[in-house]
Amino acid sequence: MTTVCTAEQMRTAERAFFDAHPGADLMAVAAHAVATTAVTMLLGDEPLEESAEWIAQQRVLVMAGTGNNGADGLFAAAELCRDGWVVDVCPVLGSLHEAGAAAAQEAGCGEVSPVDALDRHYDLAIDAVLGIGGRPSIPDCLARLDEALAGADTPVLAVDLPSGLSADSGEVVRCVHARTTVTFASRKWCHLARPAAACCGRVILADIGVTVPDADQITSVTDLADLWPVPGPANDKYSRGVVGCDTGSAQYPGAGVLGVLGALRSGAGMVRCVGPDAVRQHVMDRTPSVVCAAGRVQAWVVGSGWGDDAGNAARLDRRLADGVPVVVDADALAVLPRRIPEGCLLTPHAGELARMLGIDRAEVEADRRGSCLAGARMFGATVLLKGAIQWVATPDQQISAALPGPAWTAQAGSGDTLAGICGTLLAAGLSARDAGLAGAGLQALAAILSPGPWSPDQLADRFPEVIGRLGAPGPVGAVERSFSA
């Protein structure tokens, strides 16, 4: 698991550190981490014994702001300059952090305006303008600098996060584009949630002595590989897990097909489809290996595409009565009793969870993490709250987030496919928590590796290749390195 925290959690951890270590100079530690990373980027493949003459030919631009983030960059600039690198400081916001600016000036750094910096060549730029307290977007002068640096193929090192990103989301309005980001104590949500993560480049986590005790955990690609059930030579279709799909309706037969595809393409030993006749015919046309007959199953997937039908409560009760884990999705969520059998997984989106909790959707959106925990507590079941950041909470109030994917997956049918994946994992013996994290993670990873508006059925057809490459070098490994740097 990778830890991730909000800006407020980070501020709280820093206050606790200073209370326990009065007089400690965290800024010096952070600045040294920035300077060390900058040198690594500047040297690249050059041998470490490069001469002072060569070093003196390399030019570094430090774009700095007025706050602590700017100070980290300015003290890093001073360290680089003392070590022989040529450094220019650029006061992007018109002024600089006073102590940091004094240190940079004393070390021999130059100063350049945002306009003049556009016409100069730099071998590396350090973005230390806005930190975790910054609002989304950047001023025009910084946007022009970012564009010029990109045009010159100048690598950018961001301090904590690229200026213009919100620490707590994957939102991108206008920001600096970094090749590498060095952050402190814990990753922030913008480092992991897309599309912001793509603007951070490679994320390096520097240890500055601060711990964030209330940081959340998020699954990485390595976690996904560890969780995924891989059959052995002694397995057969029953021991691998039989998934029953009671999904779809005459009005929404596609939901039944998508759930079956999710289950089948994620490795189920067998999939049984017991939905209405119209659904079964569509399923057989698309997936002839599916069994359209009743029989024993290790897990059920229910609710997707049922529609608003008076018989939904009885339909759900039939599946709950089997006593096996159930993925309860979509329309089945509306007829839930307060308590359901142990081991079930509920997969609402924000609107559905709001109805389940009896609150407004805006309340869920304002605190998705807390709302997910509340749902798990109220229903005594594990809850996977679907969305840009997908939380999984258990009845005993453990909570983690799944590997985030791109916004392309926010389309009709994605939830139906996800329910099928989770059904496969429950049938294979994973806990509801692990099934939710791994199911959402597979869908996200497939979308990361196949960028663009692929429909849910097309994305499901890519699941086998992605599963086969889990833990292997190549494209999947490249995604993992963004978590583990």
Image (tube, helix red, strand yellow):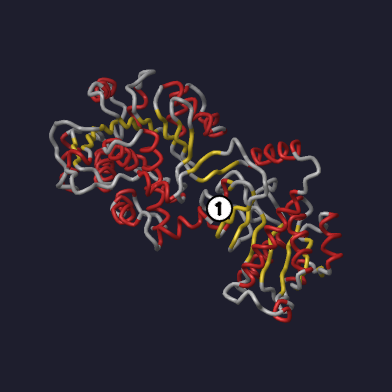
Looking at the picture, tell me which residue is in the foreground, 369 or 242. 242
Q: Specify whether 417 is left or right of 384.
A: left
* Residue 322 lies in quadrant: top left
Q: Seen in the image, is 183 located left or right of residue 341?
A: right
Question: Picture quarter containing residue 168?
Answer: top right
- The vertical placement of 75 against 316, above or below, is below
Location of residue 380 in the rendering, given as x and y in whole percent from the top left corner: 41, 22
Name the residue furthest front: 49
For badge 1, the amino acid type reads: Ala
- Tell me which residue sits at (41%, 61%) in the image: 475
Say which quadrant the C terminus sits in. bottom right
* Above or below: residue 278 compared with residue 359: below
Question: Of residues 170 and 88, which is closer to you in this image?
Answer: 88
> Is 219 placed above or below 19 here?
below
Who is closer to the viewer here, 458 or 484?
484
Q: Residue furthest top?
A: 338
Q: Which residue is mark 1?
A: 196
Count of picture labels: 1
Q: Quadrant of residue 103?
A: bottom right
- Residue 454 at what x, y percent from top left? 36, 54
> Residue 196 at what x, y percent from top left?
55, 53
Badge 1 element:
helix
Rendered location of residue 240, percent (x, y): 22, 41
Report crowding for label 1: few under 14, some 14 to 19, many 20 or more residues within 10 A (C-alpha).
many
In the image, taking residue 123 as reference, residue 389 lies left or right, namely: left
Q: Residue at x 42, y 58 (%)?
A: 451
x 51%, y 51%: residue: 194
Residue at image position (56%, 32%) is 367
Name the residue nearer the viewer: 399 or 49: 49
Residue at the outermost left position: 293
